C-alpha cells in the first residue's frame, strides 16, 4: 500500500507548507508551498517540486538556477498539515543568493542580517 498525497491536510487553496532542511547540517533552508501533485512529483522524481503561487505553476527547485534540492527524506507532521523535506542542497536555497531564506534575525528588537549573498 503506497502513500496517498490526498491524505494530507491542504488549505482552502489546496496547498500545504513545505519546509526544506539541509540533510547534513540540519539548517532550515526555506519554506514554500506544495499541492498534491507537487507532493507526488517530488516523491516520484526525487527532485523537490513546489507550487508557485505567483506563477500558478510547478516550480522544480533549481530547474533554472541550478541550485537543486535532491530529496533525501520526506516527512509529514503529526497533524498532517505540514511537510518537512530533508534535501541535499546545491548552491544557495534563497532567491537572494543566500544559503538560507532565514537570514534576518531579530536581536534586541532590531533586525540583523546574519548572512550575506554567496559569491557567484
Image (cartoon, grey):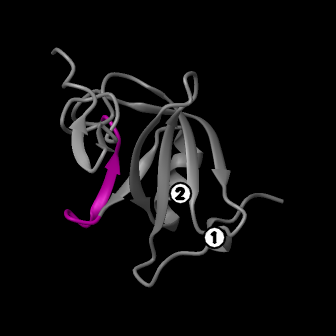
Spot the residue most to the right: 1
Question: Judging from the image, what secondary structure is the residue with disc 2 in?
Answer: helix
Image position of 7 with respect to 1: above or below: below
Residue 79 in the figure: left or right of residue 106: right
Q: Residue furthest front?
A: 108
Identify the residue under disc 2.
39
**Is residue 21 left or right of 55 when viewed as pictured?**
right
Residue at figure coordinates x 44%, y 71% from the top left: 15
Q: Nearer the viewer, residue 65 or 37?
A: 65
Rendering quarter of residue 112? top left
Residue 69: x percent and y percent?
A: 43, 33
* Residue under numbered circle 1: 8
**Residue 58 in which image quadrant:** bottom left
Residue 58 is a magenta residue: yes
The spot of residue 78 in percent (x, y) is 72, 63
Q: Position of residue 21 (x, y in %)?
A: 51, 37
Residue at mark 2 to residue at mark 1: CA–CA distance? 10 Å
Image quadrant containing the C terminus: top left
Looking at the image, residue 112 lies above or below residue 52: above
In this view, the residue in front, 20 or 47, is 20
Q: Residue at x 84, y 60 (%)?
A: 1
Discs 2/1, front: 1
The span shown in magenta is: 53-62
11 is within the stretch colored magenta: no
Q: Are marks 2 and 1 in contact (CB under 8 Å)?
A: yes
Amino acid at each position: 500500500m503506497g502513500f496517498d498525497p490526498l491524505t494530507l491536510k491542504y488549505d482552502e487553496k489546496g496547498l500545504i507548507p513545505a519546509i526544506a532542511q539541509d540533510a547534513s547540517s540540519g539548517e532550515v533552508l526555506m519554506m514554500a508551498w506544495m499541492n498534491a501533485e507537487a507532493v507526488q512529483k517530488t516523491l516520484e522524481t526525487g527532485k523537490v517540486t513546489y507550487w508557485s503561487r505567483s506563477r500558478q505553476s510547478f516550480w522544480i527547485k533549481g530547474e533554472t538556477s541550478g541550485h537543486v534540492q535532491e530529496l533525501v527524506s520526506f516527512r509529514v507532521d503529526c497533524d498532517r498539515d505540514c511537510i518537512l523535506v530533508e534535501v541535499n542542497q546545491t548552491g544557495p536555497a534563497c532567491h537572494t543568493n543566500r544559503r538560507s531564506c532565514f537570514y534576518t534575525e531579530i536581536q534586541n528588537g532590531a533586525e540583523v542580517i546574519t548572512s550575506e549573498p554567496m559569491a557567484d
